[in-house]
Image (spheres, rainbow, N blue to C red):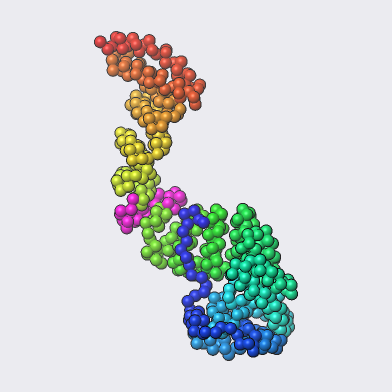
Amino acid sequence: MFTDLEVIPLKGRLRSSALVLAAFAALIGSPVLAQSTKTGPRVMIPTLQSTDKDLGVQAAEAIRSQLTKQTNLRDLVVVPKVDINSSLQSSGYSTTEALAPGDAKALATLVRAPEYLEGTVTRTPTGYKIDSRLIISRDMTKGQILPTAQGAKLDDAASQVARSIRDARRQLGAEENCHNDVVQGKYQEAVAAARQGLAGYPNANIVLVCLAEAYNALKMPDSVVAVAERVRANDPRNIPALRMLAETYRARNEPTKRLEVLSSLAAADPTNIRLIQDVVNEYAAMGHAQQAIPLVRDLLQNNPGDPALLNLAWLVYLNAKDYEGAINVGNEMVRVDTAAATADYYTRLVAAYTALNQPQKASEAAALGAKKFPNDPNLSLIGANSLYRAGNLQLALDAAKKAVAANPKNPQGYYLLATIQGALNQYDDVANTLNQAKANGADPTALSQLALQQGSNAYKAGTASKDRADFQRAIKFLQLSDQLQSSADAKFLLGASAFSLGQSAVNDANEKRSCDLARMARDAFNLASMNLPAGGQKYPNEAAQLMTAIPQFTPAVDNEVKRFCK
């Protein structure tokens, strides 16, 4: 799944329409759903998709007519146009427009058709072309792609489709047996039933999918891949086969093949919100959130203003680190649904502006969030950080103190507070904050590094300024760092800072005849001698040079103490 991505469940294309409700009522209201023994099962041919709506209606009727001529009632009943139109009209649907897949399934249930056709008809320079698929009503994702039919006359193409429907139906009895066996956990029997169905129709995709499901239940991944890839070769848009391939390639740790399959799965039905959501999550789980952006972008274009899709897109853009896109989508999301402007939203929004190096925008977003959620400690901390990055140090200091007070056990608050105090040259406060953090359970390693950084900065400042106060500050923080967690870095810098302090003090002590400076020099050289050997483990050459230099100052220091400290 997405790191940090929690997707809200979305509605699929099977909408709660009057047609769906009518189909449900038909199911629960009829005690007997089986077909009459005098007639065969029913197949529904609804209006086909077409840029010419009259052509879609004409093609559907032509296929009904040709299929009726080629079969008899004992084998198959073609649902009449009048029955289809009556059901559509009673549910408030157009009788001349092609149905969405979910509504087609609902209509098939309503007219008691266990099979139905979906397809597209177009005019060509030489006549007509029909691309179609036979679907089983039990599961609208399972269907048999039929050969493309072309003819100079519409009836010619329709006749080819009718013959293809008859051929494809030869697998259905075996598929039903296979399906029932899988449901009952009789997987070997399901395999046998599926193989019988393949005997007369080798490209039987519906029964092949059932065979792959049985192999999957038997934990035979190689067989699953072999069968599902066979289906995919014949029908690149076969959703059940693609889903099984994606899952099997995930289990077999074959990311390249899995990504390829996911791309095919998204292309199989780009208007299916639930399917695209699943693909988006899969991309995220693989660390390829960037590839999910075109998918959510298309969904938003086709479903503008959908709050759930905006939330999905917001999270996808964030995980893909497309922060500009995330901000645009996020602004639209909270415009459409003000309840989406949660504390988490403001936290992520601030982080997005920060990642784009827009500290002022981040600070403004943090202020809005803090105003709406004044008691949220995490938001206060984010706001303090954005103010710090924007250069508003005093406001950042106040916000960081508030965040620490609200949640004393959050180490991040102390780290930020100490950083801001350092930027304001409040060095005593920095030391107090680090000690307070330690008392509240913060990681000593992290605290030690913060103290080390302060000590290093002070040592560099003293090297440049020659000011003993800088070296004294460096010693204070480096000792604190070493106390929190001993390190060669702290030992060496502590010894170097002490040496520099002693060198400065011994020179001024002689000039000013100062006992205090003489003693400061003596104590500093002693401190350097105690820490440089351990620091030499990491910095041997530098430590050796300083250790060699210390004895050269010792006689002068002893003499100054003797002369000036009476």
Asked if residue 432 lies left or right of residue 89, the reply is: left
Judge from the rendering whether residue 541 lies leftward or rightward of residue 342; answer left or right: right
Residue 440 in the image, given as x and y percentages of width and height: 33, 40
Q: Relative to 99, is 192 above or below? A: above
User: Does 520 lie within the magenta span?
Assistant: no
Side (left or right) of 294 relative to 305: right
Residue drawn at 47 percent across, 61 percent down:
7
Q: Residue at 60% across / 60% down in the picture? A: 247
- How many numbered marks does the figure carry? 0
| Quadrant housing the C terminus | top left
Q: To which quarter of the image does residue 465 belong?
A: top left
Q: Position of residue 250 (x, y in %)?
A: 60, 56
Where residue 502 sits: x, y (%)? 37, 19
- Is most of the magenta stretch helix, strand or loop? helix
Q: Residue at x 39, y 13 (%)?
A: 553
Q: Which residues are magenta?
A: 351-377
- Residue 3 on image: x %, y %: 49, 53
Task: Evaluate whether residue 430 shows in this view.
Answer: no
Residue 339 visible in the current orientation = yes
State whether residue 262 is above or below residue 449: below
| Residue that appears at 56% across and 57% down | 283
* In magenta stretch: residue 352: yes
Which of 161 and 123 lies nearest the eye of the viewer?
161
